[in-house]
Image (spheres, grey):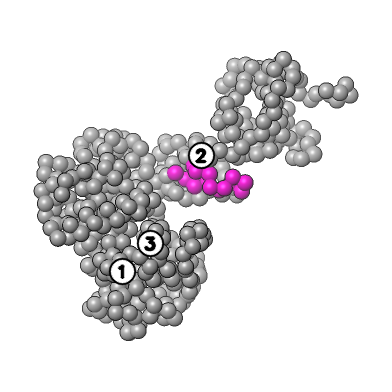
Amino acid sequence: MLNRSLVSITDFSKADYLKVLDISQKFEKDSYRDLLKGKVIATLFFEPSTRTRLSFESAINRLGGRTIGFSDSGTSSVTKGETLNDTIRVVSNYCGLIVMRHTLEGSARYASEISNVPIINAGDGANQHPTQTLLDLYSIQKTQKTLDNLKVFMVGDLKYGRTVHSLLMALSEFNTSFYFISPDELKIPDEYKMLLKNKGLAYSESRDLNDTIGEADIIYMTRVQKERFSDPIEYERTKNAYVLKNEMLRITKENMKILHPLPRVNEISTDVDANPKAYYFQQTENGVYVRQAIISLILGLKL
Amino acid sequence: MTKDKILEVSAIKDGTVIDHIPAESLFQVISILKLENFNGMITFGTNLESKKLGKKAIIKVSDVFFKDKDINRIALIAPEAKLNIIKNYSVVEKKLVEVPDEITGIVKCVNPQCITNHERVTTRFRVIEKKNVKLRCHYCERMTYKENLEIL
C-alpha cells in the first residue's frame, strides 16, 4: 500500500483489507500518536461533506499532522474556472497526501494519474467511497469477532447506493450470505448478482424485511431517496416498508448489529437508537481509526 | 482476378486494402485511423454492393502497413473488416480485425457525470465483452453498451 492511491475498493486486495483492519485496532487502543508531525495533508472537498471531512481531519490531527484545503468548491479557485487537472498539479506540490471528494465520477482516478503524491478518494459522485467500505468492514469484524460466513442484510436503495456496492465487493472475499431487501425499482443490479454467482456465494432478494430478519448477523440500512423513483406514488407506497422500527428487532439474534453509512433521514426510527443492536453511531467512531490506519499505511508511518 | 470482374476502386501496388467496412462507418474509420492527415495516396469507395453488409465501403492506402494495435481500433465500428496486405499488386497476407482488450480515446463514456465528459481527459475502457461490446470506463467504472456507443 506504500505510496499507492486508494481510489476504488478493488485497488486493495483481501490481504490489504486485513492489514488495514489490524492497524485500525492499534489506533483504537491508542489513537493519539505524533506520527505525522511536521507533515501536511490536503483535504480537497469540491463537494461538501460534514462527516467524512471531519473524520479525516480528526484522524490527521490525532496523528499530529496539519491540513490544508477547502470544504466546498465555492471557496476554491474552481469558481475562477480552474480545471481539476490544474488544481491537483498545484496542490500536490504543497503536501504529502491528498484526500479529495468530488461530484464527478472518475475524478479521483484521474487525479491519481496526474498527482505526484498519493490520492485517497473520499467519494467521487455515485461511484466509490472506499474508506467507508473499510470502516464498514472494521465495524462488522469488531461486532461479530469475524468477517467470515456472516449473513448480511442490505436494505433500501440497492440500485444507486455506492456504499452497498463497494461493501458487497469487499465482503464477497469472506464467504458472506447476502439478503437484498429493496423495492422493485431499487433492486441490486444484475452485474453484482453475477459477481456473487461467479464466486459461488448465496444470496436472496425480497421486498419485505420482516420475513427473514431473524437470521441476520448484520443489517446494513441505506436511505431510500424520493428522487430515485420515476413514479412519486410508488415512492409514497413503498417508503414506509423500508423503515426499521424497534419492535421489529425483538426476533433478531443477540449478536445482530445495525449499520448505516449516515446521514439517516427516517429509515431507522429514533426508538431504535437506544437499542444495543443499533451500531451506526459507534460506526462513525471506527471511521477515525480506519482512516488513521489507511493514512499510515500509504505514507509508511512506523507505529 | 478474372477479366469480366471490374474493379470499382483501382488497385494499388503496395499498401493495405481495408474491405467490408459498413458503408455508414467509412468516415469514422478514416478518422480513427487518422487518414485525413495522411499525405500519401488513398482511394476509397462507398455504397458498394455487398452480400454480407448490404452496402459496404472499401479503403486502399498506398505504402502503409498498419500495426495490429492501430488497425484493431476500428473493430468496434467495423467488426467484419478484412485487411489485405498488398505487395507488388499481389495479396501477400489477409487479416481480420479483433476488438482489443482496452480501448483508448475512441469511445465517449455514456455517463454524463464522468470526469471524461467534463475535462480534457482521454477516455479509456476495459473491454468486458467483445462480441456484444460491453465496455467499462477506467475512470467512472460505469458500463457503456453497444446501443449507446458513441465515437468521439
Work out whether residue A98 can be spotted. no
Instruction: Chain letter for mark 2, please.
Output: B
Same subunit, labels 3 and 1: the answer reads yes
Residues at discs 3 and 1 in contact (Cβ within 8 Å): no
The mark found on residue B39 in the picture is none
Dot 1 alpha-carbon crowd within 10 angstroms: few under 14, some 14 to 19, many 20 or more: many
Q: x, y (%) of residue A169?
A: 41, 58
Q: x, y (%) of residue B99?
A: 59, 39
> Of the residues shown, which amino acid type is indicated by label 1?
Leu
Q: Is residue A245 above or below residue B144?
A: below
Q: Quadrant of the N terminus of chain A?
A: top left
Q: Residue tagged by mark 1?
A: A259
Q: CA distance from mark 1 to mark 2?
A: 38 Å
Between A296 and B39, the residue placed more toward the observer is A296
B131 in the magenta segment: yes
> Of the residues shown, which amino acid type is indicated by label 2?
Glu
Work out whether residue A284 can be spotted. yes
Number of numbered markers = 3
Report the residue at 60% width, 25% height from top.
B66
Report the residue at 38% width, 68% height from top.
A149
Instruction: Chain letter for mark 1, please.
Output: A
Indicate the secondary structure of the residue bearing disc 1: strand
Query: Image quarter for residue B98?
Result: top right
Report the residue at 43% width, 68% height from top.
A178
The mark found on residue A174 in the picture is 3
A4 left or right of B147 in image: left
Indicate the secondary structure of the residue bearing disc 2: strand
A251 in the magenta segment: no
Indicate the secondary structure of the residue bearing disc 3: loop
